[in-house]
Image (cartoon, helix red, strand yellow):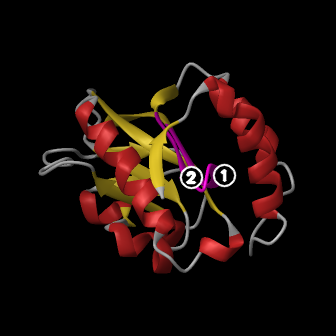
Amino acid sequence: MLIRNVKESDFEEIYSFVKTAFETAKNSTGNEREFVSEIRNKDTYIPECEFVAEKDGKIIGHVILSKLDIETDDGEVFHGVRVEQIVVAEDERDNRLGGMLICNACMMAAELGYPGAFVVGYPEYFGKFGFIETAEYDIENVSGIDDKLVLACPTCTGGFRGIKGKVNL
């Protein structure tokens, strides 16, 4: 298996993969494929933080991150990232592949100077990779989404040190 950055030549295969993978997912809106295009077309898209996993030349996993700014209580801006989408092929879902993709993307985010990551997701899953409720880092969830589902994880040591603010996902 190989985890690597996405190339533009992967886009069509990724769209097809995402559509197929979400047909068997627990939660699906039916527009996940289009969501990938929407993310790529925003100025918050970070191409270096989009990865695929390949096995035998076929895409079996995909993750995409985007920039997320948090206004701190002292008026500063904290530049973090948001895990927009994580997708793993049905027959690979028990192989820790999702975690490997998230870790690769978050390590790249740290290298690019983004010290923290956020996600809307289930703590039972994302907690395995270090994500906890934002309140644990003095970051208030103001998005209207259940606090238990708005999670954060530092991408580097001390990533949220001294940060107090609000996140709107």
Q: Is mark 1 on a helix, strand or loop?
A: strand
Q: Do the residues labelled 1 and 2 touch (CB within 8 Å)?
A: yes
Query: Which residue shows up at 14% across the image and 48% down it?
Result: 161
Q: Which residue is drawn at 71% across and 32% down?
A: 11
**Magenta highlight on residue 113:** no
Mark 2 surroundings within 10 Å by alpha-carbon count, few (fewer than 14), some (14 through 19), many (20 or more): some
Quarter holding residue 144: bottom right
Q: Which of 116 and 89 is in front in this view?
A: 89
Give me the residue at 87% from left, 55% from top.
30
Where 126 sits versus 144, above or below? below
Tell me the residue that label 1 is attached to: 58
Under mark 2, the amino acid is Glu
Q: Label 2, on which residue?
A: 54
Q: Give the range drawn in magenta.
A: 49-65
Hey, what amino acid is under mark 1? Lys
**Local SS, label 2:** strand
The answer to whether residue 100 is left or right of residue 115 is right
Q: Relative to residue 128, is residue 32 depicted above or below?
A: above
Residue 64 picture location, percent across and down: 55, 42
The crowding category of the residue bearing disc 1, from other C-alpha atoms within 10 Å (few below 14, some 14 to 19, many at least 20), is some
100 on left or right of 51: left
- Real-space CA distance between mark 1 and mark 2, rounded to the nearest whole angstrom: 5 Å
Q: Residue 130's x, y, as percent?
A: 31, 67
Going 59% across and 74% down the picture, which residue do you hit? 93
> Quadrant location of residue 69?
top left
Give the quadrant of residue 128.
Answer: bottom left
Residue 62 painted magenta: yes
